[in-house]
Image: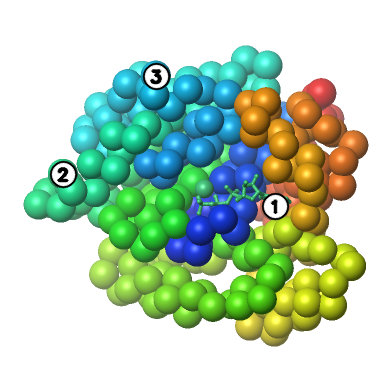
């Protein structure tokens, strides 16, 4: 059965998509069968994997409206990474589902038939706490992965996320967990970054991944080539951090990595 995690933080630009793509690519390189679900109308995960979002017909949007998800998945053979792509049409789903019964459980329902086909499903949520993100949380059987950028006001807004998680627990999915906080865009030259690491660890004791993602030009460049970092700059510091994160996640999950395939 697939382990299902949602990358969530309503703050924009904190590294949700970068983490979904690069963690996913390393998990795949370690022999895991990985599906990345793009649940963001911005379709950044789709673009970052080299797929033209404007050419996507169906994708996550159709899956939410009831089409079988298996038929909508694209496979990147080289990376051994599967993608349920998004298109800008996904923005409409939020409106179209509003009147529907069980609207918060649509993604969970759509992914159920895929659970046997993958080891990991990573859901890239949009920067909001609306219906799409709630669908992501309800589907995240194994918890939320929360990227937090190492910058001023890093913790700002996390209270709102915690409230949303509580609300989802109370009304929809009592078992919802926070699997861990991923610190991103760490800059070793600034005291601020170190302060944020300390502060986040104080707020989320025992819940912060030891692997910290540094600010890395290579990580920011890779999407313009439609590649995850392991296929673009495998020896960069950013690549090493995501490899370490993948190992740490698997270790915590009791999953033994296969020898890494290039
Ligand atoms: N560690 C990093 N070092 C340098 N640049 C990064 C790093 N992580 C992400 N970026 C860049 O920062 C920007 C925001 O990252 P990303 O798209 O992953 O955030 P996000 O949380 O998914 O954003 P959104 O909320 O808009 O979906 C992107 O341009 C990305 O390439
Ligand atoms: Mg994103």
Of the numbered discs 2 and 3, the one sitting upstream in the chain is 3
Q: Say if mark 1 contacts mark 3, CB within 8 Å.
A: no
Mark 3: C-beta under 8 Å from nearest atom of ligand 2: no
Q: Is residue 12 left or right of residue 110?
A: right
Q: Say if mark 2 contacts mark 3, CB within 8 Å.
A: no
Whole-percent x and y of residue 236? 87, 41
Residue wearing tag 1 = 249
1 or 2: mark nearer the eye: 2
Residue wearing tag 3 = 55
Residue at figure coordinates x 80%, y 24% from the top left: 261
Image quadrant in which the C terminus is located? top right
What numbered label is drawn on residue 96?
Answer: 2
Residue at figure coordinates x 49%, y 75% from the top left: 157
Farthest residue, direction top? 77
Mark 1: C-beta under 8 Å from nearest atom of ligand 1: no
Label 3, secondary structure: give it: helix
Q: In the image shown, does 231 or 219 lie closer to the viewer? A: 219
Q: Is residue 96 left or right of residue 50?
A: left
Task: Please tell me how crowded label 1 is: few (under 14), some (14-19), or many (20+) other residues with Cα within 10 Å.
Answer: some
Residue at figure coordinates x 61%, y 53% from the top left: 15
How many marks do you count on the picture? 3
């Amino acid at each position: 059965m697939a382990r299902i995690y949602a990358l969530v933080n309503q703050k924009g630009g904190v590294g949700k998509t970068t983490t979904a793509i690069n963690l996913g690519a390393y998990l795949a390189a370690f022999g895991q069968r990985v599906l990345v679900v793009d649940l963001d109308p911005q379709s950044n995960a789709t673009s970052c994997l080299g797929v033209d979002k404007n050419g996507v017909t169906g994708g996550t949007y159709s899956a939410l409206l009831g089409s079988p998800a298996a038929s909508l998945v694209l496979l990147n053979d080289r990376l051994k990474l599967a993608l349920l792509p998004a298109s800008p049409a996904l923005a409409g789903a939020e409106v179209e589902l509003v009147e529907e019964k069980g609207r918060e459980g649509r993604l969970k329902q759509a992914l159920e038939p895929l659970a046997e086909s993958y080891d990991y499903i990573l859901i890239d949520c949009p920067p909001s706490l609306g219906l799409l993100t709630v669908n992501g949380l309800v589907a995240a059987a194994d918890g939320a992965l929360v990227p937090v950028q190492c910058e001023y006001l890093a913790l700002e807004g996390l209270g709102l996320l915690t409230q949303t998680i509580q609300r989802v627990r109370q009304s929809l999915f009592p078992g919802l967990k926070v699997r861990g906080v991923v610190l991103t865009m760490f800059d070793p030259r600034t005291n601020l970054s170190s302060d944020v690491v300390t502060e986040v660890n104080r707020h989320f004791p025992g819940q912060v991944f030891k692997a910290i993602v540094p600010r890395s030009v290579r990580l920011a460049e890779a999407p313009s080539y439609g590649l995850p970092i392991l296929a673009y700059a495998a020896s960069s510091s950013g690549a090493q951090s995501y490899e370490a994160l993948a190992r740490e996640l698997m270790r915590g999950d009791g999953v033994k990595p296969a020898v890494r395939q290039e």
